[in-house]
Image: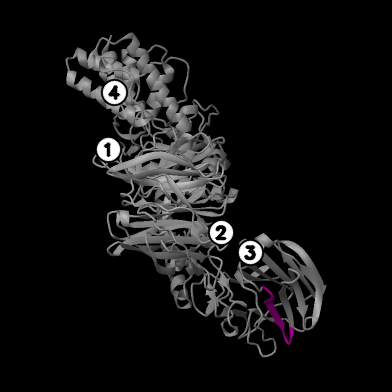
Amino acid sequence: MLLIFSTIGRAQSYLSYGLAFNGHEAVAEKRTSFEIGSGRPICLSGVVRLEFDLNFVSYNHIYFGYILRIVNENQNIDLIYDQRASLFRVISGQKFFNISFAADAYRLYNDWNKLAITLDLNKQLISLSLNDRQTGSTAFAFKGNCFRFLYGANDDERFHTRDIPPMRLKDIRIFNNERLHNHWPLEEVSDTLCYDISAREPARVKNGVWLKPGHQYWKIASSFQLNGNAVTGFDSRNEQLLIAGTDSIVTYDLRQNQHPRTAKSAKQENILIGCQGIYDTLTNRFYNFYIDHRKLATYDPASSQWNKTFPDTILTEYWHANKFISPLDTALYIIGGYGQLKYKNQVQRYQLRTGKWDTLSVSGNFFPPRYLAGLGLNISGDTAFIVGGYGSMTGDQMLDPGGYYDLFAFDIRSKTFTKRFNLDSVYGRFTFANSLVIDAKRRQYYGLVFPKDSFNSKLQLIQGSLDKPVYKLTGTPIPYSFYDVQSFADLYYAPGAGKLVAVTLLYADQELHHRETSVKVYTIDFPPLDPEVATLTALPQKSFLYKWLLFIGLFLFTSVLVLWLYSRRRAKRRILPVQVSHSPETAPFIPVPEEIADTDLIETIPEQVLVIEEAPELPLVAAAPATEEPVALPLQSAMPARSAIRLFGPFQAFSEDGTELTGLFTPLMKELLLLILIYTVRTGQGITSDELTEILWNGKSAKDAKNNRSVNLAKLKSILEKIGNCMINKKSVYWQFQFNEGQFSLDYDQFVHLTKAHTVVDRPLITSLLKVIESGAFLAKTEYDWLDDVKAEVSNAVIDMSLGYLKQESEDPEFVIRVANAIFFFDRLNEEALEFKCRSLVLLRRYSLANNTYEKFVKDYRDIYGEEFYKSFNDVIKA
């Protein structure tokens, strides 16, 4: 348990901790030093290896200086950076050694670089390596075996220096004869003393800038007022935020440590309420556009002028619309918006080259009208991701408006919307600031969310996946005064500076005919880190003893509990010889003890003898594979007699006494179970570990993926024990879902039997099928990429069988209505089902219901396809 906590904490803070050094950009007395062994030298023998991770802080002018000074008695070994030659050099006293090497420039400023210095006291030799590649060695006569390690500036009387480059350090490690002797992770958030985690050796810090708080807390970078209705844009190439008012443009340069904000006079006679700004890095131009007039103004930095003005007008009908500039066709795209009690889902385009506006005809999944959504463009510029928002299916504010928690992808080439998923486990209501930041490498997005029903609101950073319906909130909140049409917020990313940038605008009438915008700019280091989680790895010295006492207490408690549970389980077990069949269709299911429930350990158990629980009255069997041979099937109900898992309708799980246990499943547990269960029932084999890794832990190392799989399978097995009469087992290379056929109900297994085992579609078969599918669509409200084919397969089978039956036997109107209603679960715009249902209602003289059914179908058809249904009511009911 402690190992898991440690791993999680380290993984979350890997890129977000360390110590930054003030270099030449700071006055001499404010420069940073980090000293190991300054009070008492560290004495070692044999081979000593010092390792540390280093990078340089970008956008500084002077990088010359001392990185490390190793003091051995009264002699020094120095690692310095020669800025003029862009080389690292090693010197001692007034002598240059024949060791010099260069680092990859991009990696030096944008990633960590592992430096290793080996001091071989036996061979009297010094050698260096960079990122595990040897860079050189030289003979050196050591005068003793005790060392001090001085990073950056130091006040040593003999080796005093203030020439240091602006650098960052983390994970300083000392090895003695290949054994770790000391390790300073530099995960602290403050303090002038830090202790290594191996031997509690102290190191002194002066003028240190700890990196972790910068990843935890938003800090306000600038706050000012602008005349008029300000608009913003971000030049990601030069990492400059631009905010334009009616008489000036303010530029905030993320690369400048000193005086980053500058202002320039720039007259724009009218920036209308509802205007938005955007910066085009393709042409290096700042645009201000007004959607209602379909006009766009361009700012010329050379003349400090806008090329056109906007006349006064009524309020915009496109509040908080999303926008982006596509590099594919160098056009400005605008999606959604709100105004005049209407939510929009239009996709408008402005051709920057020709000045032409048009409204695009789009296809794919229906994109519900909305505003206050977040939008980000992928790295190739061909797909826009849109998440969340507020609106209604019809676009009318008076007809059931609400929040959206979905993610759509808009393909710019095909002009197609594709719904990816709905967010799982949405806690509280929130909407999005205008832009998303897309992290292409990790397939993640970052956005700002806030509740729209409060003026004194707060922006909260959200980190979500582009492939799965999961997210988390991170960083500290940002104060945000939200008043719908009077407020605006946006999020940008400056990769060189390594910061996320948030900007908030609040428009206010200061006096008659004079508006003013309050502008606030916030920054946080990237990647952001949750403060509560981060501080777990940075306990101060005074809590060290308490921490270990707590750990020891937890360990003893856990040990006693495990021994007690083991003794109880052992008393209930006996050794039984088991003849294991190698046929997947006939193999009995053998419960595996929890002690060996790990993924790969199961394979090592001898087949002849297994430790199992007392044998149940009925043998557990694997979910039966599909077969072409017709078999006699009982007409089973989808309602659980005892234990049950339902996949038709929303996902549900029940224990033997009927208690619903669905809430025990986290999103990951649910997806893991569904993968194993559906693959087992659908194919008769199951799913391999490699397939699970590819779907659930893609991008992780083999070791991390295996650890994740083992931990989550153990959790899943615990949940299935509570459900009863079902479990997960591994046979050969396949994970399988297996259950006790007499005491467990699985509607998907019943469905597969019904659709595959019968060749004649008759009344008894459809009756049995209805008992399964009348609970609702297959895994309603559950969306995964890998599930799309399965859902299509289920829907096609239901529709084909149901319509096939109705075309042969449609004399019982009540039964026909049941079948048609079931079809609508899987295809709500199925025209044949509409005809059968309306005709049956007319036969039953339920004319009002028939007309209501038709009207609802027509409305849904119009909303989804954007055009009128081509058949009249009389055409539909015509025999």
Q: Amino acid at mark 2?
A: Pro
Q: Residues within 10 Å of mark 4 (few under 14, many from 20)?
A: some
The Cα–Cα distance between marks 3 and 1, rounded to whole angstroms, is 60 Å
The Cα–Cα distance between marks 4 and 2, rounded to whole angstroms, is 53 Å
In the picture shown, does residue 792 fall above or below 482?
A: above
Of mark 1 and mark 4, the one earlier in the sequence is 1
Q: Nearer the viewer, mark 4 or mark 2?
A: 2
The residue tagged 3 is 109
Q: Residues within 10 Å of mark 1 (few under 14, many from 20)?
A: some
Q: Nearer the viewer, mark 1 or mark 4?
A: 4
x%, y% of residue 650?
33, 36
The Cα–Cα distance between marks 3 and 2, rounded to whole angstroms, is 11 Å
Q: Which mark is residue 667?
A: none
Main SS class of the magenta portion in the image:
strand
Q: Amino acid at mark 3?
A: Tyr
Q: Give, as a single range, the part of the protein colored magenta.
A: 63-75
Horizontal side of residue 803 vs 417, given as left or right = left
Of mark 4 and mark 2, the one earlier in the sequence is 2
Question: Between residues 96 and 229, which one lies in front from this camera angle?
Answer: 229
- Quadrant location of residue 717? top left
The residue tagged 2 is 495
Q: Nearer the viewer, mark 3 or mark 1?
A: 3
Q: Residues within 10 Å of mark 2 (few under 14, many from 20)?
A: some
Q: Amino acid at mark 1?
A: Gly
User: Visible in this render: residue 507?
Assistant: yes
Secondary structure under the numbered disc 4 in the rendered image: helix
